[in-house]
Image: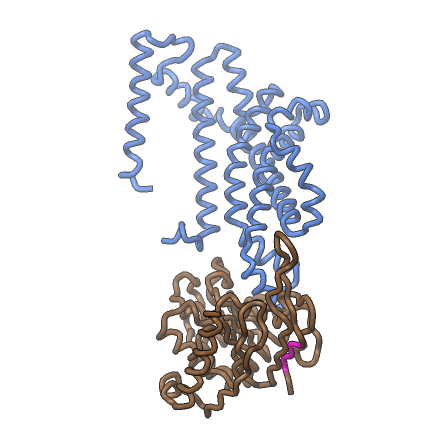
Chain colours: A brown, B blue
Amino acid sequence: MDFLELNAVTKDFPSRSGPPARVMDGVSLAVRQGEFMAVLGPSGCGKSTLLQMAAGLLPVSAGEVRIAGRRISAPPPEAVYVFQQYTRSLLPWRNVRDNVGFAVEHRLGRRRARDVAEVQLGQVGLAGFGDHFPWQLSGGMQQRVAIARALAAEPAMLLMDEPFSAVDALTRLDLQALILDIWTRRQLTVLLVTHDVEEAITLADRIAVLTQRPASVAQLLEVGIARPRDPVTTRELPRFLQLRHQLLNTLLARHEA
Amino acid sequence: MKLSRIWPGLVVLALLLAGLEAAVNAGLIRRALMPAPSAIAPVLWGLLESGEVLEPLFATLRLVFAGFAIGSVLGIAVGLAMGWFPAAFRLLEPLVELLRPIPKAALVPALMLFLGIGETMKITSVSLAVLFPVLVNTLQGVRGVDRVMLDAARTHGWGPAHTLLHLVLPAALPFILAGMRISLGLALVLAVLAEMLTGQGGLGFLILDMQRSFLIRQMYAWLVILAVVGLALNGLFLFVERRALHWQPALRP
């Protein structure tokens, strides 16, 4: 069953002079329940725009977004967006516990939100860090806080916008393993936007490749590598290398064009 | 603050007082206009020791605090509304831009016509002076709230009221407090001025009254008290501000 459907989604942004600029042209994409899908594309192609529309954060200009069969026009309770810039999405005046409680405090109240936060912090390996402030933590730990916050809302789906692009390479592998673990344990549906080909292959069941602006889906690939996957050994498989070769060629060629 | 950092400034102050003392004693400055600091000090001490200082001091502080509180609350409320609801902005922006540049001191005579010369008029003048810097800074703070943060609230299903109270207000707090710090100085100015113009109560009235009565040493003594009040108010505010914004990068230990 498809959990997230984008049907012929088009997006125009108003431009200062002349007609509106079309950044996305008739994108159709369906993410199955429990599936991990990655969206790859050259930078500036509108990947984040796509994800924001899927999250109900940005209205579509034409077409429709459906989540769990329902057409959405505002952020739905089933899906939570994880932002690329954890420094901007966490509240600097709140400690880590209250930043995670952010996800549920408006429904449960501040006090119960803190209990929920403690549990979630344990799930991302940050037990005992509740009293710290975001700026006292490393980038990788701050992104763990952001992930704990998203999980605290108990969503069925995560929409992740290049969540690991702002951390160093080793931390990135660490966080990828964490996300795979969480996805498996919670049977989540994930749509991950990235420009990192290896990340997409390591994590995803299927990979959608976008074209340059106005973006449309150029390719939809089945990864077909058995799970559980490992951030180290999976990268040495022939299938991994073959996909990497193919995807990089596609992306680079389109970039040069 | 460490002593080693403030002592050069204190030395300058001491030198200036000594220079003043010498100049007055040498006859370079007329005693009638500027008595020697050593002549002012006993008068000042007398005011403090007898407790004579308390009533006018509290009268002025009451004006400052009441006007500051009313003006700040109104400024924050209107600033939040204008920053958050585009309709409120369009409705009020011309009015605010028209009233904001008027030096609020110039409104005191008009206010006296409507409200007389009692506490109501004085508190109103102080509130008006406080209102605008707080309002404009709050507005700026609200408009500067990071979109990513607002989107985080939306994706987690926060409603508008919860977002305004728990995200927009704290995010704008550094701006709001900066506006309030400017307003605190203005509050003291307007309190003193209103007291002078109405001819009653407080430190402002006494300074003018002493000058008119040729009690020049008393006038300077009250002036020193006023200076200390201003210093203390600012120090108190900085203390509160640091506490409230302990999470800000510039204030991190």
Residue in the foreground of this view, choosing between A115 and B144: B144
Q: Position of residue B157 (x, y in %)?
A: 63, 68
Q: Is residue A19 visible?
A: yes
Q: Is residue B78 above or below residue B17?
A: below
Camera sees residue A115: no
The residue depicted at 47 percent of the width and 59 percent of the height is A92
x 48%, y 51%: residue: B244
Front in this rendered view, residue B61 or A256: A256
Q: Percent position (x, y) of residue B237?
A: 47, 41
Q: Percent x, y for residue B201?
A: 58, 24
B62 relative to A89, above or below: above
Find the residue positioned furthest to the front. Answer: A257
Q: Which residues are the magenta region?
A: A3-7
Q: From the image, which quarter does the N terminus of chain A lie in?
A: bottom right
Magenta stretch mostly in which secondary structure? strand
- Name the outermost residue toward the bottom: A226
The part of the image, by quadrant, that contains residue B160 is bottom right
Is A242 in front, or is A49?
A242
Residue B200 image-quadrant placement = top right
From the viewer's perspective, tell me whether residue A182 is left or right of residue B27.
right
Where residue A166 appears, x then y in whole percent?
A: 42, 67
Q: Nearer the viewer, residue B214 or B75?
A: B75
Tell me, yes or no, whether the highlighted magenta stretch contains residue B172.
no
